[in-house]
Amino acid sequence: MQNFEFYNPTRVLFGKGMIAKLDEQLSPETRVLILYGGASAERSGTLGEVRAALGSRTFKEFGGIEANPTYETLMKAVAMVREEKLDFLLAVGGGSVMDGTKFVAAAVPFEGEPWDILTSKGEAVKKALPLGTVVTLPATGSEMNCLSVISRQSTGDKLLFSNPLVYPRFSVLDPMRTMSLPMKQVINGVVDSFVHVMEQYMTHPVDGMAQDRFSEGLLSSLIEIGPRIMATPDDYDLRSNLMWVATLALNGLIGAGVPHDWTTHMIGHEITAKYHIDHARTLAVVFPALLKVCREAKRAKLLQYAERVWGLKDGTEDERIDAVIRKTEGFFENLGVPTRLSAYEIGADGINDLLGQLKDHDMTHLGEHGEVTLDVSRKILETAA
Ligand SMILES: NC(=O)c1ccc[n+]([C@@H]2O[C@H](COP(=O)([O-])OP(=O)(O)OC[C@H]3O[C@@H](n4cnc5c(N)ncnc54)[C@H](O)[C@@H]3O)[C@@H](O)[C@H]2O)c1
Ligand SMILES: CCCCCCO
């Protein structure tokens, strides 16, 4: 196991009706900005529950945060916080709203050009406003991590920053608040969570016994939840399990002390930035291709995954690896999520453009050992064609 430092300050309030506990998390004089995305926050009744829980506190509202939140929109929220002298940010939404809120928290006190929060990958962040979340889409785990992905319309960039100062103070996870989700978004959450686990698992063995078993448990849970939630979308227990699994997939626990490989996400971000394809759906295209191209570097963990998660013990090593990659592709495809670039009509020219974006973003070497060069990234994208 590798050395690690684990820190996660986020209080999780899980279950039906937990929005009411907001009242216990915020002092009466707190001046709150509620940030949200589209009309669903209002239509689903979630915003109404939040307003009721805030009681007589001063609060303002900022809506319209897009899927793949943009710098341009978020800077309007920054101006509002400064003008209204607000001191707490409350995200009501999915990963886009939570990430956008983390950016606003860092940008309000930031001295200098706020986009440098992204270009510095969060290194430049020295102060941040406190924030909390009310989760309406289980997928990203943003509710319990210090990561944020922000796009810039003017340049087409989609970049990640992280800083411990933007961990939510608390996050409310009420599965009932996800019932208004279109099934497509529910499935996006299954796929995004699955690949989050894989980015922290599918590397090489370091005897992280607890981390491996924990990750394999999350993967097995998602493999069970995915088809079942499509069949019974109103099942509260399934929704509960998806919500908690999605949070655990990226709150730091399974990634502590083990190698990571975020190649799939880094390439996926570029596909979303250029083609505006849902984040999770880019991952379902890239990840299986990455397994095929990087199978030697990941041989040991592929075999462990095949046996422990899919029960594949028979045949030669290569037969088991081929089988488990097919199983993984089949898992995505059976959820109605394509695993080929051709499903989105992205061809050779698109692949060249995507590689250019990776180069522009200093991502010419990815993978746990930097072995995923631009040439390997090309192979991955060509394999995914
Ligand atoms: N911070 C992280 O750790 C992390 C991890 C992975 C991805 N991301 C980023 O998160 C973003 C994706 O977030 P997401 O997958 O949660 O989707 P999202 O937040 O973009 O929401 C997708 C759509 O669903 C709608 N929606 C949300 N909740 C709803 C509800 N309860 N009912 C009806 N509609 C609802 C939103 O308004 C939006 O239109 C991307 O920008 C991605 O890069 C962040
Ligand atoms: C290094 C962690 C990258 C997380 C990407 C979230 O989209």
Image (cartoon, rainbow, N blue to C red):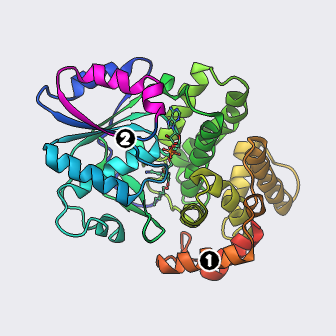
Residue identified by numbered label 2: 63
Is 227 drawn above or below residue 140 in the view shown? Answer: above
User: Does residue 48 belong to the magenta stretch?
Assistant: yes
Using the rendered view, name the quadrant where residue 216 is placed. top right
Using the rendered view, name the quadrant where residue 372 is placed. bottom right
Q: CA distance from mark 2 to mark 1?
A: 33 Å
Q: Residue furthest right?
A: 315
Residue sitting at x 70%, y 59%: 285
Residue in the foreground of this view, choosing between 77 and 172: 77
Q: Secondary structure at mark 1?
A: helix
**As drawn, is 59 to the left or to the right of 90?**
left
Residue sitting at x 50%, y 33%: 244
Residue 100 coordinates in the image, percent (x, y) = 37, 50
**As drawn, is 221 to the left or to the right of 71?**
right
Looking at the image, is mark 2 or mark 1 nearer the viewer? 2
Residue identified by numbered label 1: 353
Residue 185 coordinates in the image, percent (x, y) = 60, 39
Q: Is mark 2 within 8 Å of ligand 1?
A: no
Amino acid under disc 1: Asp
Amino acid under disc 2: Gly
N-term mark: 2 or 1? 2
Q: Which quadrant of the rendered structure holds the C terminus? A: bottom right
Magenta region, residue range: 39-62
Crowd rating for badge 2 (residues with CA inside 10 Å; few <14, some 14–19, many 20+): some
Residue sitting at x 20%, y 54%: 108
User: Does residue 177 belong to the magenta stretch?
Assistant: no
